[in-house]
């Protein structure tokens, strides 16, 4: 159980629960997040990977700050930054970072990139002809010169690696898609926009220059982003990395000049015209990521995980926590608010055939006391299970013993909730509607849809959750047509569609989760090679994360890291971890994924998980 209910910031019925229990559109995530308090330690600050540092979670305040304090280009990068996470997981980039990318693949990439750069030079030339401002013309001219210099750098790569632009085969479709898109934009072939020859006023010509920059800026920013990400992983003692020169060159690249120019050219545009630039920016970002993904890598790679999956011989078993792993808010807060909002007022008399319930005021006070007691005792429990000093190497048995105390605590807390009667009188239809409107983490639904709808993948999905009401979880995924998910959670008992306040206890603690995990894994037949992946966010997931072949921690729970570190668990950002695994790869001697390795991989979003398992 994880209490997230806060008396200081109660959900206002008119603002939130009325939406959850009706058919009206749901408020944006930040409107609900501002009304709920997270479980202590679930979203605490903690060290994150360079990728995750580039993608901090958005809040209502951060969104407002972005809108008022940064320029157009930066706003677009922030808005679409979760897509930028996909690029490093492309097999080409992963092998490049590890240093074992085959030289013929890099030669092919250089030849493709030359076509990119030539299109860029042409697009800058067309944009320069459209720009009315002398300073803008000078800036565009300087950017075009930089592209020509970059082409010269590619010539040095040709000499160093023996490539020949003229002998590297045809241009691949991903390259053509982007260059055609860019040159069409620069030529004025944008919906609702006149071609350059028909632009009568300086303003119309400047507008086209802005559109062109909108289609180029994400490419510049993404290259700089990748360069910095890869340079951060270079070993200073590894002077033999064959692609160090390329990495260091792009790590020092900057998109600031391009972004500043886009901001300047866009100042006088209307909202509708800015929307066009945003669409062009987003399309360019997707095409650039597709370009990296399309580079032909014939060597074995550690990602995407399903690349070598054979549905006849292999089985992928995905396990996931629910609260704050899949959801934006904890389910206990939703159930608490349904109870409070639907409870009778103190002056309202219940009819004889209704279950006796507390008034809404009494419920709110009781929830507050339960929440406060839980938080205080949870923190005391975490303190009590810590070892006197940090150990080297995973101490799994000691961790299991320590988490027995946490398991006992969780069960006592659940007993208090049941005995208090706060879960009595909830209508099943209210719970179902609330579940259907529950906001899930960005990319979570799409990830599970990708698994269950993929006919070329033999996979099972199991959700292991402390949630008091499995019906809430089932309803949460029903809107995404995800009825195939196996839900393992506690259940409310109902009498004529009204909750009795009792809970059928199935998964209450870390040990319960571990038992469910092992039972499911053992029940899978041995007709295929099974690979288990567990995705979680809290101390309650720790044992399952370690037992799985691959344990993925999403979010930044400080209590999870604190307990894990104390018992010898290593937390490694996923992308750097994959680069190391790829670097160690020797065909025929590659160390497979294996549980109880003591290493857990951390991510900032479901986008990273999706990219790792399925690709960009």
Image (cartoon, rainbow, N blue to C red):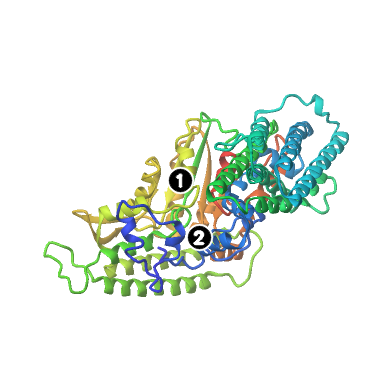
Q: Is residue 601 left or right of residue 160?
A: left
Q: Position of residue 203 (x, y in %)?
A: 64, 46
**Which secondary structure, mark 2?**
loop
Q: Give the labeled residue for mark 1.
A: 445
Q: Position of residue 469 (x, y in %)?
A: 33, 55
Residue 234 in view in this figure = no
Task: Work out which quarter of the rendered image holds the N terminus and state it.
Answer: bottom left
Residue at 42 percent across and 53 percent down: it is 439
Q: Give the labeled residue for mark 2.
A: 538
Residue at 76 percent across and 38 percent down: it is 121
Against 558, residue 605 (above or below) is above
Distance, label 2 to label 1, CA atoms, is 20 Å
Q: Is residue 559 left or right of residue 354?
A: right
Depth check: 363 or 139 in front?
A: 139
Outermost residue, left side: 352
Q: Is residue 129 left or right of residue 413?
A: right
**Which secondary structure, mark 1?**
helix
Depth check: 54 or 484 in front?
A: 54
């Amino acid at each position: 159980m994880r209490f997230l209910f806060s008396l200081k910031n109660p959900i206002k019925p008119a603002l939130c629960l009325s939406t959850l229990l009706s058919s009206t559109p749901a408020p944006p995530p930040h409107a609900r997040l501002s009304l709920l308090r997270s479980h202590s330690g679930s979203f605490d600050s903690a060290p994150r990977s360079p990728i995750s540092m580039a993608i901090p979670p958005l809040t209502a305040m951060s969104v407002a700050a972005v809108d008022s304090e940064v320029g157009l280009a930066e706003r677009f990068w922030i808005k679409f930054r979760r897509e930028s996470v996909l690029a490093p997981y492309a097999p080409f980039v992963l092998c490049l970072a590890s240093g074992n990318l085959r030289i013929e693949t890099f030669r092919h990439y250089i030849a493709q990139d030359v076509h990119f750069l030539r299109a860029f030079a042409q697009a800058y030339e067309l944009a320069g002809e459209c720009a009315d401002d002398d300073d803008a013309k000078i800036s565009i001219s300087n950017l075009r010169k930089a592209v020509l210099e970059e082409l010269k750098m590619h010539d040095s790569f040709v000499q160093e690696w023996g490539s020949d632009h003229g002998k590297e085969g045809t241009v691949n479709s991903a390259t053509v898609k982007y260059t055609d898109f860019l040159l069409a934009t620069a030529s004025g072939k944008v919906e609702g926009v006149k071609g350059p020859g028909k632009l009568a006023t300086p303003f119309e010509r400047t507008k086209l220059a802005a559109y062109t920059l909108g289609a180029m800026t994400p490419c510049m920013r993404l290259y700089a982003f990748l360069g910095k990400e890869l340079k951060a992983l270079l070993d200073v003692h590894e002077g033999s990395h064959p692609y160090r020169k390329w990495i260091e060159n792009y790590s020092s690249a900057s998109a600031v000049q391009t972004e500043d120019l886009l901001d300047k050219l866009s100042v006088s545009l209307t909202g509708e015209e800015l929307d066009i630039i945003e669409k062009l920016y987003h399309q360019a970002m997707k095409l650039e990521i597709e370009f990296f993904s399309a580079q032909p890598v014939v060597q074995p790679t550690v990602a995407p995980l399903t690349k070598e999956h054979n549905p006849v011989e292999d089985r992928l078993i995905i396990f996931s926590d629910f609260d704050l792993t899949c959801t934006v808010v904890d389910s206990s807060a939703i159930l608490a608010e349904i109870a409070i909002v639907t409870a009778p007022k103190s002056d309202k008399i219940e009819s004889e055939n209704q279950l006796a319930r507390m008034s809404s005021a009494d419920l709110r006070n009781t929830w507050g006391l339960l929440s406060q007691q839980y938080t205080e005792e949870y923190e005391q429990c975490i303190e009590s299970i810590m070892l006197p000093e940090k150990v080297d190497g995973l101490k799994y048995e000691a961790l299991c013993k320590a988490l027995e105390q946490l398991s006992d605590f969780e069960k006592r807390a659940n007993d208090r909730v049941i005995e208090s009667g706060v879960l009595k009188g909830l209508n099943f239809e209210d719970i179902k509607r609330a579940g259907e409107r529950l906001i899930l983490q960005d990319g979570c639904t799409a990830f599970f849809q990708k698994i269950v709808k993929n006919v070329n993948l033999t996979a099972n999905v199991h959700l292991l959750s402390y949630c008091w009401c499995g019906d809430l979880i089932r309803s949460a995924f029903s809107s995404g047509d995800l009825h195939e998910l196996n839900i393992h959670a506690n259940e409310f008992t109902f009498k004529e569609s009204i909750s009795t306040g009792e809970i059928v206890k199935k998964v209450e603690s870390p040990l319960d989760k571990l038992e469910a995990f092992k039972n499911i894994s053992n029940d899978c037949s041995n007709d295929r090679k099974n690979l288990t992946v567990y995705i979680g966010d809290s101390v309650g997931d720790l044992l399952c994360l370690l037992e799985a072949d691959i344990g993925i921690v999403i979010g930044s729970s400080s209590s999870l890291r604190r307990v894990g570190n104390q018992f010898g668990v290593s937390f490694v950002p996923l992308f750097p971890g994959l680069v190391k695994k790829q670097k160690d790869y020797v065909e025929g001697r590659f160390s497979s994924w294996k549980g109880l390795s003591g290493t857990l991989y951390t991510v900032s979003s479901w986008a990273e998980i999706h990219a790792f398992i399925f690709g960009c």
